[in-house]
Each structure stands twice: as C-alpha cells, then as structure tokens.
Amino acid sequence: MTKSSTVPAVVAFDIGGTSVKSLTVTRDAVLDVHSTPTRADQGPEAALEAVLDEIDTTLAALGDDYEAVGVGVASPGLVDETKGLSRHSENLGWRDVPLKALVQQRTGLPVGFGHDVRAGGLAERYLGAGRGAAHQAYLSLGTGIACALVLQGVSIVADGYCGEVGHGGSGASGDGEPCACGGRGCAETYASAAGMVRRYRRLTGRSLSGARDLVALVDAGDEVARTVWNEAVEALAGITSDIVRVTGVSRVVVGGGLSLAGERLIQGLEAGIAQQLTIHRRPEIVPAALAGVSGSWGTALLGWAAAGYDLDDIAAGYLEKGPSALIREVNR
Ligand SMILES: [Zn+2]
C-alpha cells in the first residue's frame, strides 16, 4: 500500500430485488454512488448478467489514481456465506448461484460476500447504533423481517438459513394468514410492511401504499389502523423477546423501512418486550444510525475485510465523518 502511489479503494454492490446499489469508497472518501436495475423481470440469467456488468462498469470507471483492492457483494434471500452461494432469492429467481466465485473470476479481486441484512448489521456494529455493544441483534423490518446477530463482538453467520425470524414468531400457530414461505400466521403476515397493508385492506377494503400510510392513519385516529399496528408491534415484540431469551443480547438495533416509523415503533417495542420478558435482561432498543444506507456501508466493509484490512481501523476513518455524513454521502 505504501509502495504504490495509487489510493486503495473498494467497490461494493448491495443487490436488491429491483436494483443494485453501488458504492465506491476509499478509506476516507466516497468516490461514487449509484443504482442500476437488476432486470429481474427478464429472468434470473439477465439479473445475474446485470449485476456482473455493473461490477465491470464500476471498476472501469475507477480513475488511474485509485486501485481496487477488494469487492463487496451482498445478496438478498437465503445466502450461504461459507460456500459463497445465493441459495434462494425470490425476487431475482436465483437458486444456488455461486455468486462469490463468479465475481472473483470476473474481477480477479478478493471478494467479501454476504447476506444483505447481515451486511446492514455489520455496518451498524462498526459505524452505527451497535457500536460499543459486544452482544447485539440487528433487526431489519421492511418487506421482510430478518435478524443478524453479533455476539462477543463477532458477526454470527450460519450456512444461509439463519436470521429468517419473520417466518415463525408469536402468531405462527398454523391457523393464521397464509405467508409467502408456505406457512401460516408467520410474524411477517402481521408485521412486515406488506403484511400490514394486506391486513388493513382485508379489514376495510381500502388500499394503502405502504406502512407509512398506516402510521399516518394511526395518527389520525383510525381504529382499524391502530389495531393492525398494535398487532404488528406485538408480533415484533414476540420475535425480539425470543431473540433476547436465546442470546441475552443487551442491545437491539432496529433498521429497515419500518424503522422510519421512529419513536412510535421503538416505544411500542419497548412496551411489548417489557410485557413479554420476565427474568431476562431488557435490551436497549435503538433505531439504526445508518437507516437506508447500512446495506451499502456493510457491503463496503465486507470488501475491505476480504482485502485484508482491519475493520476497526477502517471504521475509525469513516467515523471521523459521523453517521449523518455517512448517510448524506451515499444519498447524494
Ligand atoms: Zn412465513
């Protein structure tokens, strides 16, 4: 690194159902950020090519002053970090795609590969609301509900099937609403954004564009909206309480689209957990500090780690900017 006059950089790709978010960073600056469609509507192969093309384009755009030292890739759905596989992505149509190896072949660079929610958790642990807590859970509440654990300071990863806490939970008695996973009454049918919208429509016949509309209706005194919201929070409190019973985490960081509901969500969760936990330690419930950008930053951290950099060291450089700058520079 010192022998060269070029500045080391990492390119990071947070793959979602409809778009890939690309982030190019040095140790102290954001060089580029943009988003490109996955073309998933044209099939799984097209989506894969779109991702690989995007990686080529981003690397080609890196100026002569910079040298890519690593690539970070985060994938949605079921992800096997150990084997480098995207096992199952509903939106992209991927089944057992060896994404890590494909990116390695394409770029010749070290590749850090992970699950999108676990990447978000990694960003919160090093750069956001999880800093300083040795044991923490990152709950991503949005289209789906998933959890990433950091215990004793180390991100806990299993073979691709961990963290799907939304399928199950307090409502999963077998007689609830059908869930996309094939089960019934999963917490996601109550507490995901889509689940809340669906429940509200079933009870009133009225359509909402998202969870934000539902929260606005709760504020406006709509009784049905209040019921749907309270059931959602109760289901989330059930999941969170189970996580605490098993792991004893002292802090729960709440991210994902639903976290934009802010204090209403945090206070609701705190109250629900207080009812459900007895002898257990009550965790702090805190909103994600990097809401909306934690996936991109976490994916960049995966790239730095793959390139052999120490993440505490890397994080220290970014933290000089503060979380608001980390959000602003990615949303620019
Ligand atoms: Zn389910």
Image (spheres, helix red, strand yellow):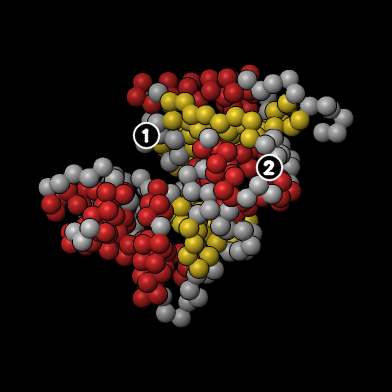
Distance from the alpha carbon under mark 1 to that under mark 2: 28 Å
Q: Residues within 10 Å of mark 1 (few under 14, many from 20)?
A: some
The residue labelled by disc 1 is 91
For image coordinates 42% across by 79% down, the residue present is: 278
Using the image as rendered, state which of residue 90 and residue 312 is in the foreground.
Answer: 312
Q: Work out whether 282 lies above or below 136.
A: below
In the image, residue 108 lies at what x, y percent? 68, 24
Using the image as rendered, state which of residue 85 and residue 299 is in the foreground.
Answer: 299
Residue 49 is left or right of residue 300, and the answer is: left
Picture quadrant where residue 269 is located: bottom left
Q: Residues within 10 Å of mark 2 (few under 14, many from 20)?
A: some
Quadrant of image for the N terminus: top right
In the image, residue 329 lies at what x, y percent? 57, 38
The residue lying furthest to the bottom in this view is 279
Picture quadrant where residue 309 is located: top right
The residue lying furthest to the left in this view is 205
The residue labelled by disc 2 is 305
Question: Disc 1 on helix, strand or loop?
Answer: loop
In the image, residue 192 lies at what x, y percent? 32, 51
Using the image as rendered, state which of residue 284 and residue 322 is in the foreground.
Answer: 322
For image coordinates 51% across by 37% down, the residue present is: 331
